[in-house]
Amino acid sequence: MPTFETFHMPDAGEGLTEADVVTWRVAVGDRVEVNQPLLEIETAKSLVELPCPVDGVVSELLAAEGETVDVGAPIARFDVDPDGVAPVDDAPVAQDAVVAEAVAEPVVAAPAPAAPAAAAPPAPAASSPAQEGSGAVLVGYGVKAGSAQRRPRRDGALDPIGGVEDASEYPVLAKPPVRKLARELGVDLTTVTPSGPGGLVTREDVEQASQARSARSLATYAADDQPWLESGYSKDGGRSTRVPVRSVRKRTAEAMVKSAFTAPHVTVFHTADVTETMNLVARLKADREFADVRVTPLLIVAKALLLAVRRHPEINASWDDEAQEIVYKHFVNLGIAASTPRGLLVPNIKDAHRLPLKELAVELGELTRLARDNRTPPAALGGGTISITNVGPLGIDTGTPILNPGESAILAFGAIREQPWVHEGEIKIRWVTQLALSFDHRLVDGELGARVLADVGRVMSDPAQGLVWG
């Protein structure tokens, strides 16, 4: 007799309440082992791969790809005794002491279909708390269950009309005009989610299913070039696509709105001759000490900002509105804004103020690689104190960036271009860039912001100045 165990959405150690199912690595019927990759979830902070908590066979997947699931909700069921060899009276044993909290799932007996000359099956015995399903657990661990369970039928599920013989002809409830419309539009009624009373498929359900199937592309683009539309649906014949706001995009929107309408932003600008910075980058690329790291102008501007913070440490602060206090940080976690397939992330380099130039280059390269691969760890996304947004590679001269929540300043680093410039009394072609510093005017006044930006520009114009200040 099969023995089932339910796996619930765990708290991935980030204090979050929900996550999106991105990809299942297994299918119903697959035999699985403890710690093999089970599925990939997306939280507001990162992508997390969840390992399988048990040995057995996948019995049911309870959450679809793209679905948002609350922490503690059931997402999969396993037959942990597919060969029928486990003792029936074994007490469940926790696989590890890190079980967060058992969220029991009651045993529900499903009605057996009527059959001629067959005795009614005996009702299953009531389960004890020790036999109920496993609860929400930390990643990679589960709780063994010792009794057979059957998941309650989901709301809206319908019994076949007229018995088993009619089930193949009428698998869903729908009126004849709706069935005719489905045939005309080429919609399989078994794939339509009913919204009518008693699980009835309505005309609107069929039309929406038809539009969602055909409206994944815009008129001016090929469908293969639009991964951002994959989770969307259309309600107007394909002329537009609606994509639910989830995870990083949702949290980013919330954070940016809160930042923009809570902290009074002020932005100051500075145009700098960075020819000497470009010369330094070229020399470092040829230096054996930097042979194994990527050197770009962003490395130099990061070092310049760290030196400016050292000279003006009061810029490295945050506003505690609840306590009505200014919190001055005695460390610098340097954030670098990164555009990823999941949306905008701002991972930060911990204690960047302690790092020599080469170590800073190594950390910057690793941060960039993880962001590009969608593997930024949650720890890298919290605790930032000041940030840089590098818009130069996009050909943008400058901007007025919005503060990362909890920080007092963010530096925009624009494109570096060859331009006519007055140098030593003569007009010459020099490398020039635009710098912009946005700051929270509640705790940073205009003079402080201007001094910090001027110091960044001075180091970019003359990197040797960093030796004096460093």
Image: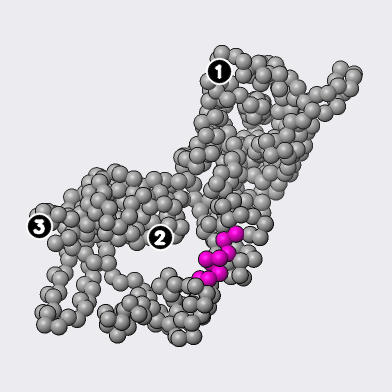
Which image quadrant for residue 354? top right
Report which residue position mark 3 lands on: 89
Give the CA separation, mark 2 to mark 1.
46 Å
Q: Whole-percent x and y of residue 368?
A: 55, 34
**Mark 2 closeness class: few <14, some 14–19, many ≥20 residues within 10 Å:** some
- Range drawn in magenta: 209-217
Image point (22%, 49%), residue name: 55
Identify the amino acid type marked 2.
Ala
| Image quadrant where one finds the N terminus | bottom left
Q: Which mark is residue 291?
A: 1
Viewer-nearest residue: 176 or 339 = 176
Pointer 2 residue? 64
In this view, the mark in front (3 or 1): 1
Is tag 2's residue or tag 1's residue first in the polypeptide sequence? 2
Q: Magenta includes 211? A: yes
Could you tell me residue 39's position as x and y percent? 37, 50
- 428 left or right, relative to 114: right
